[in-house]
Image (cartoon, coloured by chain):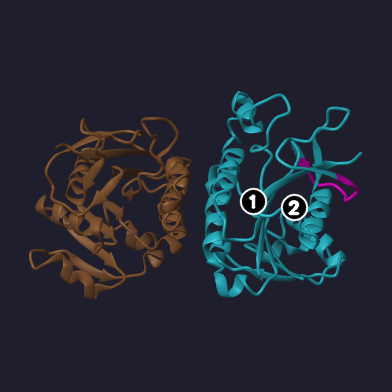
Chain colours: A brown, B cyan
Amino acid sequence: MRIAIIGATGHAGTALVHEAERRGHEVTGFVRHPERATVLGDNTNARIVKADAFTLMAPVLTRFDVIIDAFSTSPDHAYLHVDLATHLVAQLRNITTTRVAFILGAGSLQHPDGGTVLNRMEQNPELAGIINTPRQQAAELDFLRHVDNVDWVGISPAMTFEPGPATKYVAGKDTLLVDTQGRSHLTTGNLALALMDEIEHPQHQQARFTARDDA
Amino acid sequence: MRIAIIGATGHAGTALVHEAERRGHEVTGFVRHPERATVLGDNTNARIVKADAFTLMAPVLTRFDVIIDAFSTSPDHAYLHVDLATHLVAQLRNITTTRVAFILGAGSLQHPDGGTVLNRMEQNPELAGIINTPRQQAAELDFLRHVDNVDWVGISPAMTFEPGPATKYVAGKDTLLVDTQGRSHLTTGNLALALMDEIEHPQHQQARFTARDDA
């Protein structure tokens, strides 16, 4: 498939580039800073294109089978998660041949002990400096849930999401996944496994799913 | 004030142009079909500009003190209500000098007998052909409610909203307003009165309000 990855040099993006290429897909990375593409290493054939994702319009976007929105930004600019999602949706209305996948935060997941993960994070004053990011990513999912004429899917990682290898994962729907040791952890490698599995074999239509490492 | 009205030749738009001019504001109407501006009559100094509202970017929008989104479209394209709101919000992030007012439907209001007006409309099969419009306008408000760095306001009319003169109105917040005779009615003239009052004397910050005719 022709797969475009917005934010291809970020943590999630680099893992996705490698996993998509390993599976033989034709990968294009849209990045704001092409000089950072060295993080992808030498072992890549991905085409890296310098672009402001907000300027990607339907004629370019529809060249791809799948667009992955792996955009990231600082908590101060977290509203851009929402704005990029609304932009991509507006460009892809009634397009049935291009799917768009959003990497969401864990905040919008239900907490196993009740409420959402975001509700619990908001009660922790130590998180005040970063709370804007899960808050806006939850708003992004609220927005997407009203969208019924775009082929979208969202993935929320586990509570801790950090660089690490692709091993094995367990998938779920709308509840935060926690392992038998109480750990809720997803590596970027396993996010890439889970999302590429979803892209190759769609299980979730206009819905969000989640994944954790399978230890 | 410098007031821009998107959809200035529509039912709500024409009433807003006249009321804004009557109060001495400098009015610009953005319209897709300038040839329809004859509906405004001869008694107007409004500047009519042909524009696709989705192409209006921050440098143009911020020339105005207030943007009124009076865009309307067919039920089949009702998602454009959402897309225009997300576009305007994305352009006006962190702008404190331009306010944006959205004309929403009644669907998102609470029904006095419980549930939302939209919930009740969805149970009426006779409304299947138009349900997309209140549904998307409710989605538009859900989206706006997450927006905390744009100076926005929304107005929902009463259940029946149709052309008619400015007389007197009663305002409310989030519940459908019904008069003592059980009528829930708002004329375009009274919508214009209510919204221009809000624009001149803001009472609702990042919130939606409603109005009905005061018989």
User: In the shown orientation, is residue A106 left or right of residue B33?
Assistant: left
Amino acid type at circle 2 is Ala
- Magenta highlight on residue B167: yes
Vertical relation: A48 (above or below) B106 = below
Q: Report which residue position mark 2 lands on.
A: B12
Horizontal and vertical percent position of residue A150: 40, 45
Tag 2 and tag 1 share a subunit: yes
Dots 2, 1 in contact, CB < 8 A:
yes
**Quadrant position of the N terminus of chain B in the picture:** bottom right
- State the CA–CA distance, disc 2 to disc 1: 9 Å
Residue A103 image offset from top left, x and y in percent: 32, 50
For the residue marked with disc 1, what is the amino acid?
Ser
Most foreground residue, A80 or B37 = A80
Name the residue at 61% across, 36% down: B130
| Residue A148 visible to an observer of this rendering | no
Local packing at callout 2 (Cα closer than 10 Å; few below 14, some 14-19, many 20+) is many
The residue labelled by disc 1 is: B72
Magenta segment includes B22: no
Give the class, few, some or many, for how many residues have Cα within 10 Å of label 1's Cα (few <14, many ≥20): some
Give the magenta part as a residue range: B161-169
Q: Is residue A124 left or right of residue B164?
A: left
